[in-house]
Amino acid sequence: MDDFLSTQKEGYEGQSDEEKQKVEKFKTLEKVLGEHLTDVKVFRVGDVNVRYYVVGRTKGGDWAGIWTKAVET
């Protein structure tokens, strides 16, 4: 998961307030997933139109996660 979120959590000089808010949201997402899921894995499916699946086990042993899509050129 570190590789998946690493570029989304990095700020840079000259970043707008909106971009800074997005960075904080990704940091919060990482924290929430880490607190509620164990054995977290990220799967990348596709070449240009890509879907990312982040899945792990809940405290009750069920599978849970999120997915998102991206266009990579």
Image (tube, rainbow, N blue to C red):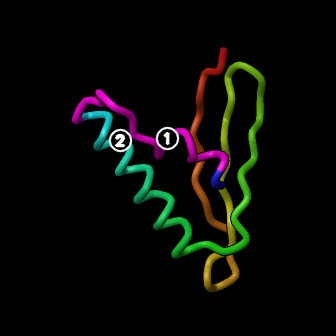
- Which one is nearer the viewer's eye here, 71 or 19? 19
* Image coords of residue 38 (percent x, y): 67, 74
Q: Quadrant of the C terminus?
A: top right
Query: At which x and y percent is residue 21?
Result: 29, 43
Pick the quarter of the image with the N terminus: bottom right
Is the Cβ of the residue at disc 2 closer than 8 Å to that at disc 1?
A: yes
Which element carries disc 2, helix, strand or loop? helix
Q: What residue type is labelled 2?
A: Lys
Indicate yes or no whether the magenta region holds residue 35.
no
The location of residue 30, given as percent across then percent down, is: 51, 59
How would you rate the neighbour count of disc 1 (Cα within 10 Å): few for under 14, some for 14-19, many for 20 or more?
some
The residue sitting at 47% across, 67% down in the picture is: 32
Q: Residue 22 carries which label?
A: 2
Asked if residue 48 is positioned above or below residue 10 in the image, the reply reads above
Looking at the image, the residue that sits furthest to the left is 17
C-alpha span from label 2 to label 1 = 8 Å
Vertical relation: 56 (above or below) 9: below
- Looking at the rendered structure, the kind of residue marked 1 is Gln
Picture residue at 63% right of the left edge, 54% below the top = 2
With 32 as the anchor, is 37 left or right in this view? right
Magenta span: 3-17
Q: Does residue 35 sit above or below 6 in this rendering? A: below
Q: Which of marks 2 and 1 is nearer the N terminus?
A: 1
Residue 8: assigned label = 1
Q: Residues within 10 Å of mark 2 (few under 14, many from 20)?
A: some
Identify the secondary structure beneath mark 1. Answer: loop
Tell me the residue at 63%/65% (across/down): 64
Q: Is residue 30 left or right of residue 38?
A: left
